[in-house]
């Protein structure tokens, strides 16, 4: 367990303090409860665009990074479908600088025409580089669109297409900022060589005066149950065929979520996994293969993906994958095999928690799910799952009528 202290400011902002005096460093992690699932069609990618805008200027800070570097700090951020997360690492003695910088951009980001246009160019360039001009780059555009018909998970965080990014107006940007960037929609975690009283006083000083916006009613359209297998074939200039097969799975915290996580690990995690042994080591079809889950706040996907050996089609590969999945559904999972996977998970968790930043991020993420302690609760639950539970969920989840399949085929022009 991690020691932490949690409190709320009058404006609704949640603050968590995790003291660790083993080094002179502090981490300042600010999570906003907004990601691409809060966007609407035609204005997709705004959450990610905003992450870029936040590094522009605010009323009292001309250049965000420069002010932080002056006090020996560094920062970064990421956007996911569910959250946007900003983090800084700096000497603990300079922690107040982080409060000043972050509260200034929460309250009064400049959002000048120049900043908006500069960042628009940057994001459009990123879209082209990473998704359009990269082999297999738009796989997730294709997959999400097929697997989700009405939920906003149907587009990636960068946005559905370039047209959306080109089309944001100044009003769109301001509305997004006012709606999502305020204390009631934020969780702050400060970790490291700090004290609870010090952080309470700094939080009240810098964030206390910022008014909260009214809670918005976030009605996110939920998917209807899938009625049958979906298949899409895409031709592209790629070196070899690739196969992506996804199955619907429960949301984080729901029954079946942890089982799905373990199923993906049993089948596809690491060199000793079933898929690796059967399809790569002892097969001639896959050059690489793996399985993972999207791990999202609303129901997400259990994903199998692989690249084929030269000259092998994605269709052949799917048949080979299906055979392995069928065998998995019939076989008995031994306690020993399951324990091995749980141990790998535990080792990763231990390794992860060595870093102060990871601890801070996990506290923030699970607080956003409802309670920082869920991090350990989830882990305890996972370690108690038995082979029968895994098997029962595997049979519920790995069903052909719940699958979305993408054949990403190479055609050499």
Image (cartoon, rainbow, N blue to C red):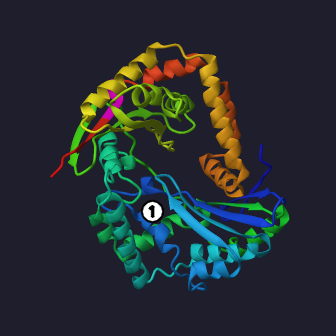
At label 1, counting other C-alpha atoms closer than 10 Å, the crowd grade (few under 14, some 14-19, many 20 or more) is many
- Residue 372 can be seen, yes or no: no
267 horizontally vs 164: left or right: right
411 horizontally vs 129: left or right: left
In percent of width and height, residue 3 lies at 80, 49
The residue tagged with tag 1: helix, strand or loop?
helix
Residue at figure coordinates x 64%, y 19% from the top left: 336
Residue at figure coordinates x 50%, y 52% from the top left: 82
Q: Is residue 401 magenta?
A: yes
Q: Nearer the viewer, residue 39 or 179?
A: 39
The residue that disc 1 covers is 47
Q: Quadrant of residue 76?
A: bottom right
Whether residue 219 is situated above or below residue 314 in the rendered picture: below
Residue at figure coordinates x 24%, y 37% from the top left: 311
Q: The N terminus lies in which quarter of the figure?
A: top right
Whether residue 272 is situated above or below residue 233 in the rendered picture: above
Q: Is residue 274 magenta?
A: no
Write down the region rendered in magenta: 400-404
In percent of width and height, residue 214 lies at 55, 63
């Amino acid at each position: 367990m991690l020691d932490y202290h949690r409190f709320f400011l009058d404006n609704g902002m949640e603050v968590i303090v995790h003291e660790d005096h083993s080094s002179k460093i502090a981490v300042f992690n600010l999570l906003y409860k907004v990601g691409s699932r809060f966007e609407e069609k035609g204005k997709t990618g705004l959450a990610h665009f905003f992450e870029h805008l936040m590094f522009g200027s605010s009323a009292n800070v001309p250049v965000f990074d420069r002010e932080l570097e002056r006090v020996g700090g560094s920062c970064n951020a990421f956007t996911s479908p569910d959250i946007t997360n900003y983090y800084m690492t700096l000497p603990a003695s300079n922690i107040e600088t982080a409060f000043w910088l972050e509260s200034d951009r929460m309250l009064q980001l400049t959002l000048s025409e120049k900043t908006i246009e500069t960042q628009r160019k940057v994001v459009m360039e990123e879209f082209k580089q990473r998704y359009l001009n990269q082999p297999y780059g738009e796989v997730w555009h294709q997959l999400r669109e097929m697997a989700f018909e009405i939920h906003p998970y149907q587009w990636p965080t960068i946005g559905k297409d370039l047209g959306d990014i080109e089309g944001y107006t100044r009003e769109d940007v301001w509305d997004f900022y006012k709606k999502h960037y305020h204390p009631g929609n934020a969780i702050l975690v400060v970790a490291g060589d700090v004290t609870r009283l010090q952080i309470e006083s700094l939080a009240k000083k810098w964030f206390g005066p910022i008014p909260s916006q009214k809670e918005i009613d976030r009605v996110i359209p939920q998917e209807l149950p899938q009625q049958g297998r979906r298949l899409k074939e895409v031709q592209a200039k790629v070196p070899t065929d690739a196969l992506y097969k996804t199955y619907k799975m429960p949301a984080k915290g729901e029954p079946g979520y942890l089982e799905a996580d373990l199923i993906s690990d049993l089948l596809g995690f690491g060199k000793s996994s079933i898929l690796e042994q059967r399809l790569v080591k002892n097969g001639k079809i896959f050059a690489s293969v793996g399985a993972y889950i999207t791990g999202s706040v609303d129901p997400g996907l259990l994903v199998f993906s692989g690249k084929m050996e030269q000259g092998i089609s994605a269709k052949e590969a799917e048949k080979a994958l299906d055979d392995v999945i069928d065998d998995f559904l019939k076989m008995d999972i031994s306690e020993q095999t399951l324990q091995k996977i749980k141990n790998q998970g535990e080792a990763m968790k231990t390794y992860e928690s060595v870093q102060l930043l990871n601890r801070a991020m996990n506290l923030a993420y699970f607080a956003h799910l409802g309670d920082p302690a869920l991090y350990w609760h989830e882990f305890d639950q996972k370690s108690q799952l038995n082979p029968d539970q895994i098997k029962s969920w595997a049979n519920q989840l790995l069903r052909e009528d719940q699958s979305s399949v993408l054949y990403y085929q190479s055609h050499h022009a």
